[in-house]
Amino acid sequence: MDIVDVREYILSLPLVEECQPFGEDAVVYKVGGKMFACCVLEFAERIAVKCQPDRAIVLRDRYLSAITPAWHFNKKHWNDIYFEQLPREVVEREIRHSYLTVIRENVTPKALREEILAVVQQEGIEDVEEIE
């Protein structure tokens, strides 16, 4: 995957907003007004995604240099994914995990969260809890 493939995949997810709140050098992807992915254009070989803390550790151990603690983000909750070093299915799985984690844990009010989750469910988008 390259950055264009990553962007296209992210924008294929329901209700995703692409914006640049940190300036022209960073592209942020949000759902329900909450950020779930960020690409700093200077470092376009990686994308930061949100992750459950235990999962983040497992992924970093399993994919050593391809998944690392995210630069300029809370390293407990964010990973940098070097997408050119990973199989497409891993990249897409972790983007979906980030997207769904943010919806479930960060989108408020509850009515908006439930509305978004209904659309996501209707689209058949699922999270993979266990890392294969």
Image: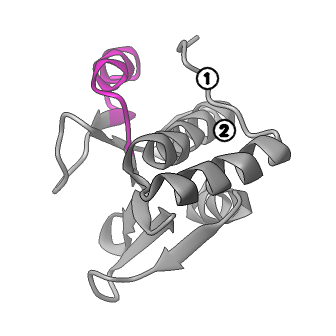
Q: Nearer the viewer, residue 128 or 23?
A: 128
Farthest residue, direction front: 111
Residue type, numbered disc 2: Arg
* Percent position of residue 59, x then y: 38, 22
Q: Nearer the viewer, residue 85 or 29?
A: 29
* Percent position of residue 120, x then y: 72, 48
The magenta region covers 50-67
In which quadrant of the rendered image does the C terminus lie? top right
* Percent position of residue 75, x then y: 18, 39
Is residue 32 left or right of 119 when viewed as pictured? left
In which quadrant of the rendered view does residue 107 lie?
bottom left
Magenta region includes residue 63: yes
- Residue at position x 82%, y 47% in the image: 123
* Percent position of residue 21, x then y: 32, 83
Number of other residues with Cα within 10 Å of mark 2, as a class: few under 14, some 14 to 19, many 20 or more: some
- Residue at position x 81%, y 39% in the image: 124
- Residue at position x 63%, y 41% in the image: 92
Q: Nearer the viewer, residue 10 or 82?
A: 10
Asked if residue 50 is positioned above or below residue 56 in the image, the reply reads below
Residue 84 visible from this viewpoint: no
Magenta region includes residue 131: no
- Residue at position x 25%, y 46% in the image: 70
Q: How many marks?
A: 2
Q: How far is disc 1 from disc 2 in space, using C-alphas?
A: 15 Å
Asked if residue 114 is positioned above or below residue 63 in the image, the reply reads below
Q: Which residue is mark 1?
A: 128
Q: Nearer the viewer, residue 89 or 85?
A: 89
Q: Which residue is mark 2?
A: 88
Asked if residue 38 is positioned above or below residue 89 in the image, the reply reads below
Number of other residues with Cα within 10 Å of mark 1, as a class: few under 14, some 14 to 19, many 20 or more: few
Residue type, numbered disc 1: Val
